[in-house]
Image: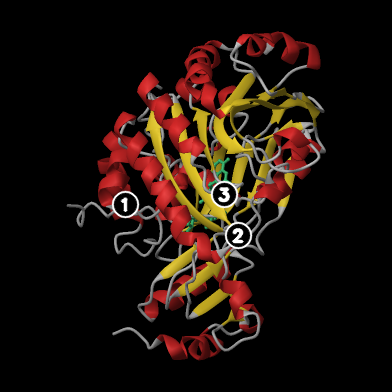
């Protein structure tokens, strides 16, 4: 029988000797801050939060949660839209204190603690002129982003974040600690690369790094939202044919009222592409010359930016605590009918920071086969995210309605699955549609490493024996 959660923090003070200063229960000052995740729509009240500093802390906390039969959540950066880094009435392992980053110039690798954010990694690797590809916001956690796949500006060039993972230190459900790589626990390593937090707590990641110029070429082209069909008809041909050094995600958005943009564009709804080129200003100008012949561009502003700078440019647009609702899909094609929906829903964007992005999933991502890692979507071309955001809690319903309405209109053109890191909790059917042919193998690896489904606060893969 499970222990009443009201007394769990008290029991932890007895059972987790030496960790007293790391425990936060409902009666402690700082509890509300400690339980808050990035998405302000998530309001969960765990019985206990443990700020772990070592793999042993993680193993002890996990054993404590299991002994008391309460759910366990693992938090990296706390960015997950569905709030998977926190759980009601259970125990949260908070990894933020395990954020050390060590760049090894001799092996072109970087070792990163399981609770680091990408800002910490980007800064450290840039000092050595190196990079590991991540997402587009630097406050995101390395843990969740990596375990789900990792899509960002450098994906076409260097692959998903998981394609740059060499190994991981993992605390398993039974408390044992292992290193997973191509040669050690290869099944676990395969599952970690896309299978989310289903298989253990990663206390340290080891990534490959790549040489990167001191500045990349970065910035958007905007067009009137009415021109979405015309721009998309061009973009869907242009981008896949472009060299891998060039990436650009398509977006519908409202131009933020900041000095970076001309005042006459402030708060105007537009469609656009946010470009990132690994190359010189001259190369960027040459590669992007065609944008001037498409529709009537309102702005084309691409210029040099160091990698850590461009990675943090959007951080201020999406601070912690905003109401956020997510939906997502993968696409192989972007037909005209889909572009018409993007125009319609773009015209109805419900707030300034709300947006729809389409990230290219090609280039180096397609060098890896659908069965080579748990990330099955190697044959799709685009990952869409529909992201409704507003600081005002009174707008939560409006955010959800626009997001779901948009998704229902565009979902029929998709493959049926979505990038796990862009999903809310949408049920087993969606999880299976995402992992497709890899689901059964994931379920078998899950049965081997976590047969009791201790790690279930995630896009959950059921252990093979329990799978329907
Ligand atoms: C503003 C914003 C922008 C984003 N942009 C991008 C983007 O450009 N590209 C992209 O790919 N994604 C992006 N994401 C999505 C992001 O990848 C996911 O939200 C991801 O889950 C965040 O990881 P986290 O560690 O911060 O989250 P958390 O909420 O801490 O964790 C998410 C899940 O991962 C598990 N987990 C986290 N760390 C570990 C660990 N060390 N060991 C085991 N399990 C762990 C948790 O248990 C949970 O199930 C963005 C999210 C936000 C909010």
75 above or below 443? below
Check the image and tell me how it is coloured. Answer: secondary structure
34 above or below 29? above
Mark 2 or mark 1: whose residue is earlier in sequence: 2
Q: CA distance from mark 1 to mark 3?
A: 35 Å
Q: Is mark 1 within 8 Å of ligand 1?
A: no
In contact (CB < 8 Å): disc 2 and disc 1 = no
Q: Which residue is mark 2?
A: 391
Mark 3 or mark 2: whose residue is earlier in sequence: 3
178 above or below 306? below
Q: Residue at x 48, y 76 (%)?
A: 46
Mark 1 or mark 3: whose residue is earlier in sequence: 3
Q: Residue at x 21, y 53 (%)?
A: 467
Q: Residue at x 43, y 25 (%)?
A: 339
Q: Which residue is mark 3?
A: 351
Name the spot of residue 133 as percent of width and height, x first: 62, 34
Q: Nearer the viewer, mark 1 or mark 3?
A: 3
Quadrant assignment, res 75: bottom right
As rendered, which of 425 and 111 lies closer to the eye? 425
As rendered, which of 341 and 276 lies closer to the eye? 341
50 above or below 464? below
Name the spot of residue 453 as percent of width and height, x first: 32, 62
Q: CA distance from mark 2 to mark 1?
A: 33 Å
In contact (CB < 8 Å): disc 3 and disc 2 = no
Decide if residue 366 is on the left or right side of residue 127: left
Q: CA distance from mark 3 to mark 2?
A: 9 Å
As rendered, which of 104 and 33 lies closer to the eye? 33
Res. 106 visible in picture:
no
Q: Which residue is mark 1?
A: 461
* Numbered disc 3: secondary structure: loop
Q: What label sits on residue 213 in the rendered view?
A: none
């Amino acid at each position: 029988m499970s222990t009443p959660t009201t007394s769990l923090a008290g029991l932890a003070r007895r059972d987790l000797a030496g960790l007293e200063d790391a425990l936060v229960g409902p009666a402690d000052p700082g509890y509300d801050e400690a339980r808050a995740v990035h998405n302000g729509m998530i309001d969960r009240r765990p019985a206990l939060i443990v700020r772990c500093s070592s793999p042993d802390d993680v193993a002890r906390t996990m054993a404590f949660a299991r002994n008391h039969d309460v759910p366990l959540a693992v938090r990296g950066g706390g960015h997950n839209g569905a709030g998977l880094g926190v759980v009601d009435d259970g125990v949260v392992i908070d990894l933020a204190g395990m954020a050390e980053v060590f760049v090894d110039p001799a092996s072109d690798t970087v070792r990163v603690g399981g609770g680091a954010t990408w800002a910490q990694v980007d800064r450290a690797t840039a000092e050595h002129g190196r990079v590991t590809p991540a997402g587009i916001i630097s406050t995101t956690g390395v843990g969740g982003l990596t375990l789900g796949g990792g899509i960002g500006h450098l994906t076409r060039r260097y692959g998903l974040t998981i394609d740059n993972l060499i190994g991981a230190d993992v605390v398993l459900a039974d408390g044992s600690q292992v290193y997973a790589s191509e040669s050690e626990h290869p099944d676990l390593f395969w599952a970690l690369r896309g299978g989310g937090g289903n298989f253990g707590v990663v206390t340290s990641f080891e990534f490959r790094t790549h040489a990167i110029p001191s500045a990349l070429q970065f910035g958007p082209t905007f067009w009137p939202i009415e021109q979405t069909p015309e721009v998309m008809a061009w973009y869907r041909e242009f981008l896949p044919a472009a060299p891998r050094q060039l990436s650009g995600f398509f977006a519908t958005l409202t131009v933020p009222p900041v000095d970076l943009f001309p005042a006459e564009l402030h708060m105007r709804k537009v469609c656009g592409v946010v470009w990132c080129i690994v190359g010189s200003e001259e190369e960027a100008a040459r590669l992007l010359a065609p944008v001037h012949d498409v529709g009537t561009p309102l702005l084309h502003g691409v210029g040099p930016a160091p990698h850590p700078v461009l990675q943090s440019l959007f951080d201020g647009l999406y601070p912690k605590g905003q109401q956020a609702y997510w939906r997502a899909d993968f696409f192989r094609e972007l037909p005209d009918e889909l572009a018409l929906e993007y125009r319609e829903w773009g015209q109805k964007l419900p707030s300034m920071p709300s947006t729809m992005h389409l990230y290219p999933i090609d280039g180096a991502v397609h060098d890896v086969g659908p069965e080579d890692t748990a990330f099955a979507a190697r044959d799709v071309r685009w990952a869409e995210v529909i992201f409704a955001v507003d600081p005002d809690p009174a707008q939560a319903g409006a955010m959800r309605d626009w997001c779901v309405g948009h998704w229902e209109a565009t979902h029929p053109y998709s493959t049926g699955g979505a990038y796990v890191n862009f999903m809310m909790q949408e049920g087993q059917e969606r999880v299976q549609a995402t992992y497709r042919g890899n689901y059964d193998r994931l379920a078998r690896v899950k049965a081997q490493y976590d047969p009791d489904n201790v790690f279930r606060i995630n896009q959950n893969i059921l252990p093979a024996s329990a799978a329907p």
